Amino acid sequence: MTTDISHRADIAAVVTEFYARAFADDLLGPVFIDVARMDLPAHLPIMCDFWETVLFRTGSYQRNALKLHVDLHRKEPLTDRHFERWLTLWCATIDDRHTGPKAELAKLQASRIAQSMLRRLAGGTGSEHHTIRAVADK
């Protein structure tokens, strides 16, 4: 039986496993390895700060995630397929390791983040409500 995500060590294990899967993935691996040239040992603590802030509101993440993705998008356009695959791998990693409210929150927030990033990379706002309103106004 799996337990919920309850502390940073749980987050670190999820993040580490997720990136192992992402680096091995045919779609995401080349983006992380060849385009972003991600230094994984340096990146993992930053992602742990990010998810610790998302799940436990620690405030330990103080960077601009959007700017990093905008810069990457300029080098290699990030598409729905990239974000769908990212979300699929993230959710599968969570499901393989944890169950409970924080695990569900990690999946929900990942979905929201992916959708917001896609909207912003397309030149829109991060708000889903703006998108709905803009469509309704057409």
Image (cartoon, rainbow, N blue to C red):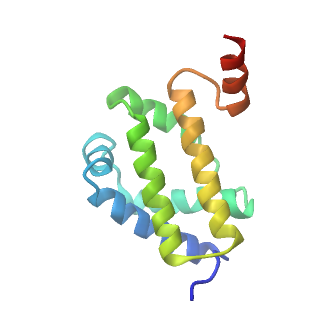
Q: Is residue 127 visible?
A: no
Q: Nearer the viewer, residue 37 or 86?
A: 86
Q: How many marks?
A: 0
**Rendering quarter of residue 36:** top left
User: In this rendering, would 86 be left or right of 26?
Assistant: right
Q: Quadrant of the C terminus?
A: top right
Q: Residue at x 25, y 46 (%)?
A: 30
The quarter of the displayed image where residue 64 is located: top right
**Above or below for 30 versus 104:** above
- Let me know if residue 107 appears in the view: yes
127 on left or right of 49: right
Q: Position of residue 51 (x, y in %)?
A: 61, 59
The residue at 44%/46% (across/down) is 84
Residue 60, relative to residue 98: is it above or below? above
- Which of the image's four quarters has the N terminus? bottom right
Name the spot of residue 72 as percent of width and height, x first. Answer: 40, 34
| Residue occupying image coordinates x 63% and y 74% | 5
Horizontal side of residue 33 vs 42, given as left or right: left
- Compared with 86, 105 (above or below) is below
Q: Nearer the viewer, residue 39 or 103?
A: 103
Occupied quadrant, residue 130: top right
Judging depth in this view, the residue of 97 and 42 nearest the camera is: 97
Q: Which residue is drawn at the image coordinates 62% and 45% (left, top)?
A: 112
Q: What is the x, y in percent for residue 9?
A: 57, 77
